[in-house]
Amino acid sequence: MTASDTTPKVKKSVISSGNEELDSKMGGGLPVNSLVLIEGGSGSGKSVLSQQIVWGSLQDGFSAAVFTSENTVKSLVKQMQSIDLDVLDHLLLGVLRIYPIELSSLGDLAPTALLQAMQHEKSRDVIVIDSFTSAIIRSTNNKHTMRFFEGCKRLSAEGVTVIIVLHSDAIDPEHINSIRSMCDAHLQLRSEQDGQRLVKLLQVAKIRGAASSTGAIVGFEVEPGWGMRVIPISKARG
């Protein structure tokens, strides 16, 4: 029996990112038991945001599972430590589990295989997929993708907060709009040029139960040893 099996479930209504400024733009945090879509282009900060949310959830006593197509267990822990998000103790205690995934070779079967793996972790409070793009990169049938999101919706109804990271161009416009409408929260990221540097912008497109946050835009930078640092929107836009 692991530590996570004996730890009482946390009675909280939102999942904090652990960053107060960021939470304030999201109506205090992400509602528990919700399906969350983090969407953006390459280098827009999707992985960093998902890692920030994982760290914040662990700090609040939630358990989490991360399925990553971008890292090994060791490299993900090291990457998070480099931006002051140390999760090693949670990993050793079993409160956090990390599963490297290689799905691109499975073609149309990848979304189903991933969903089955997630169902084995449905006792967790939070499940993060970074990224789902790897599961559909060679898919020829959007029905498998839609069924995956329907399955994620069922998991959230059973008490799991599911966070899906997705590249903006991975799914055609017709289906991405259907997926966005299915999700309880939609966070969209992009990069913009500010003089000689690129800054990252997070738009809170939708959060269930936090209508006042809809449309809020957050500028941020990612600094080694510091992590996500929210910057004034005027500075973010140059």
Image (tube, helix red, strand yellow):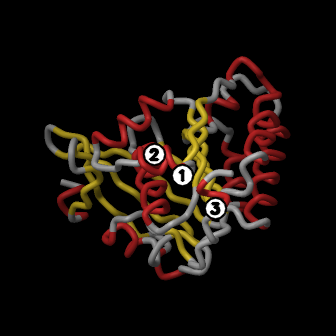
Mark sitting on residue 68: none
Q: Residue at x 79, y 45 (%)?
A: 148
Residue situated furthest left in the rendering: 196
| Residue type pointed to by label 1 | Ile
Q: Please state which of residues 8 and 201 is positioned toward the viewer in this rendering.
A: 8
Whether 70 is drawn above or below 185: the answer is above
Query: Does residue 197 appear left or right of residue 209 in this picture?
Result: left
Secondary structure type for disc 1: strand
Residue identified by numbered label 3: 125
Q: Who is closer to the viewer here, 121 or 106?
A: 121
In the image, which is nearer the foreground, mark 3 or mark 1?
3
Q: Which residue is mark 2?
A: 46
The span from disc 2 to disc 1 (Cα, nearest Å) is 6 Å
Contact flag, marks 2 and 1 (Cβ < 8 Å): yes
Mark 3 to mark 1 CA distance (whole Å)? 18 Å
Circle 1 packing at 10 Å, graded few (<14), some (14-19), many (20+), is many
Q: Earlier in the sequence, mark 3 or mark 2?
A: 2
Residue denoted by label 1: 38
> Which one is nearer the viewer's eye here, 89 or 87?
89
Front in this rendered view, residue 228 or 192: 228
Sequence-first disc among 2 and 1: 1
Label whose residue precedes the other's in the sequence (3 or 1): 1
Horizontal side of 109 relative to 218 (left or right) equals: right
**Amino acid at the residue labelled 2:** Lys
At which x and y percent is residue 203?
A: 43, 61
